[in-house]
Image (cartoon, grey):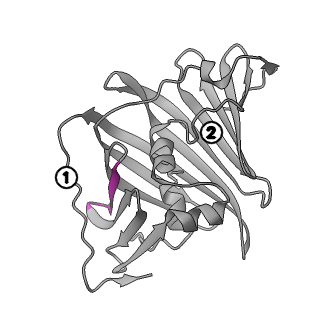
Amino acid sequence: MYVSFKLKFPAALLLLSFIVLACSKRIIPVAPPAASIDIQEIDFEYLHGKARLSYRDNTKEREVKANIRIRKDSVIWMTFSVIGVQGGKALINKDSITIVSTVDKEYYVFNYVELSKRFNFKIDYFVIQNAMLGNLVMAKGPDNNITSDDTYNRLNQQQGSVSIKNQINKTTKKLEQVELNESATGNSLKIDYADFQPVGDKLFPYKSVIDILYKSVKGLVNNTIVIEYTKAEVGDKQLRFPFKIPHRYDRR
């Protein structure tokens, strides 16, 4: 099976957005400040994982295997392959996102200012890192609104025209769902985290389901990305992040 790694914007970005479970119970407002919600967030120096990634939109579905390495608060490195053949790689650091297609011999570079303008939401390295790890994409603040029921705490936040709804399991203290909605365009992004397993001394979501709904020149587009880890490890042993773009590759 041949799978193209030509990742046009926004497909390339959506794959990395790599950027969670609505409850039918009655929501009861409570008074405590946002800081009172206890959320367990994974912490580490280096993380290494292997995962299966599937991408589906209105017309097609693709599946790849990925190697993922992260140095906390510094760099995210990924390679993608199909049937053992490398087809692409990505490097995310504090300055930009670079995606290389070895199949099409071309590469893309995105800066955070451009991405933030496109989505009307501040996107930076830490937003992407936190979304990949199942941590809050926006830090708690004194103006956040909290609701609660027997099972979940819900932290509701606002950044400009984007509303952010976080659902935290009271027992595990893990974020299980985050939903972003942009009022001006109706664009939305929802991530459901599941299959929590111990990594180091914390729980880590081995499965993430990302649903993106956005308006394009061709109409309404719905994308779904599923990330399923087969392995995840953390430690302080230094990892390598080799990344080189051949001179013959074209920038798109």
Q: Is residue 111 above or below residue 225?
A: below
Task: Determine whether, in the image, residue 10 is placed left or right of residue 30.
Answer: left
Q: Residue 207: percent from the left, percent from the top? A: 47, 38
SS at badge 1: loop
Q: Residues within 10 Å of mark 2 (few under 14, many from 20)?
A: many
Quickly name the residue at label 2: 178
Please give the residue where the numbered disc 1 appears in the rendered image. Answer: 240
Name the spot of residue 136 as percent of width and height, x first.
55, 36
Q: Quadrant of residue 99?
A: bottom left
The magenta segment: 74-84
Q: Earlier in the sequence, mark 2 or mark 1?
A: 2
Residue type for callout 2: Val
Quadrant position of the C terminus in the picture: bottom left
Q: Residue at x 75, y 52 (%)?
A: 161
Closer to the camera in the image, 35 or 243: 35
Between 77 and 88, the one lying in front of the other is 77
Q: Quadrant of residue 77?
A: bottom left
Q: Amino acid at mark 1?
A: Arg
Which residue is painted at 32% across and 33% down in the image?
44
The numbered dot on residue 15 is: none
| Residue 200, image x, y percentages | 31, 25
Pointers 2 and 1 in contact (CB under 8 A)? no
